[in-house]
Image: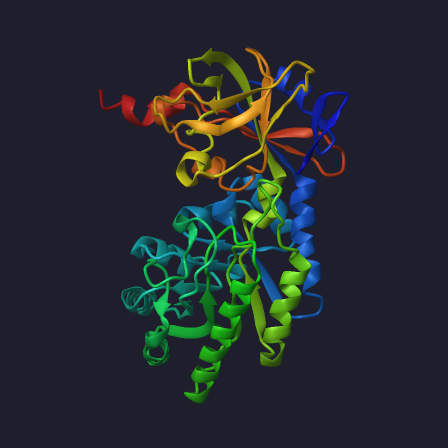
Amino acid sequence: MSTIYNDDILFFDGINVLDFALINQTPFYLYSEKIITDNFLDYQNSFGDNAHLICYSVKANSNLSVLSLLAKLGSGFDIVSGGELSRVIMAGGDPKKTVFSGVGKTEEEIRFALASNIMCFNVESYDELMTINAIALEEKVIASISIRINPEIDVNTHPYITTGMKDNKFGIDQSDILEIYTMASKLNGIKITGIDCHIGSQITDLKPFEESVSKIISIINLLKNNNIQLNHIDIGGGLGISYNNEESPNKSEFISRIIDLLKPLATTILIEPGRSIVGEAGILVSKVVNTKSTPSKKFIIVDAGMSDLLRPPLYNAFHAIKEVFHNNESKFLCDVVGPICETADFLGKDRTLSLSKGDYIAIECVGAYGFTLSSNYNTRLKPAEYIINKDTKSIREIRKRDTIDQILDNEIEYL
């Protein structure tokens, strides 16, 4: 985990979390530039001299400062909306190193992506292919595309984040691959550049990735036999992290296995990591506002809830919860819950902690799918985000906390 105790006080990337919490309004997200940088470079260095592009998955954490940091490190980007493309451009990212994924690209988004000269679209349906072609012809440009295949590979993860099964909405069935590539090769507004595959998220076993790549290789050979050549192979993302002391995959071993399989093809390899770059690089700090006991349960009620961190109720996901001040009082079994008016509003169940009103907690491994899944439900204010400089250890605010005026601005004129 990314936190340690020193004299009973929790530290994150060298920062005294208690001191920072005492002078800043909770809840807030705190990120580490060093952890993000180290994780990205682990991937980058693992490729060695092999042609590759790391396309960071923007949906994991789309804060402009996080994107800017990664852009400066040389990262490409994987986007799933026009809004994410706007963020990449504003943060200094290169559209020419950006791939556009997702099943629901609108005509407006496709036009914006073409005008921005993105690297390619990861096409997920026949309808989408024809729409991109029509818009490209209308705009008098050529759209570079890869086709996302659905490899029918089951992975040991939450069903909501499996993406490579026939029942999932993503990708093209393997039986239709040759037909759609052949069709694409005949379209005047389309240039085929690659093949894409993504089997899921939070995967901690490397075997499914190897199975996926093996299926990609078979498809590439089929395409070659039909005179369809590819410039890159996008194996997607999905590498998991350790949330609850489970063994997490080694990035260099992962890349080494992929390279061994794909090296004979002598083509550029794309990957789309998100969680494995930013997940462990963030904590959510929250304050205990009340405690409550019933005949059957003890509750710790904090000022962060499912509007700030949705993963626990959405996926029944585990996040370690640490006392910011580690006192020596007896611990007790409790549920850590938020202020939202939903029974599903919990951050952790059956945790052994020692907390009282006014204490602080830190929720670990929230750098991915934390703030990006937040909402203003119950008209709650989205929290501020901060980041720790990797060199100076200074902390700067990278997103202001919402104000009630911001939330109401889009409605008040209609009263």
Q: Quadrant of residue 22?
A: top right
Residue 193 in sight in this render: yes
Q: Where 159 sits versus 360, above or below? A: below
The quarter of the picture where residue 354 lies is top right
Residue 281 in picture, x, y percent from top left: 62, 40
Compare residues 229 and 248 and report the one nearer the observer. Answer: 248
Q: Which residue lies furthest to the front in this view?
A: 295
Q: In which quarter of the image is residue 355?
A: top right
Query: On the picture, is 66 further left or further right than 408?
Result: right
The colour style of the image is rainbow
Residue that extends furthest to the left in the rendered view of this protein: 415
- 135 horizontally vs 386: left or right: left
Q: Which quarter shows the N terminus?
A: top right
Residue 5 percent location from the top left of the image: 73, 27
Would residue 81 be visible to someone looking at this image? no
Left or right: where does residue 129 sit relative to residue 83? left
Q: Is residue 73 above or below residue 359?
A: below
Q: Residue at x 58, y 75 (%)?
A: 267
Can you give x and y, in whole percent of width and height, for residue 164 in the image? Answer: 41, 61
Residue 251: % across, % down: 65, 57
- Which quadrant, please, contains the C terminus? top left
Residue under the point 53% across and 16% down:
288
Q: How many marks?
A: 0
Question: For the point 71% across and 34% down, which residue is it?
Answer: 13
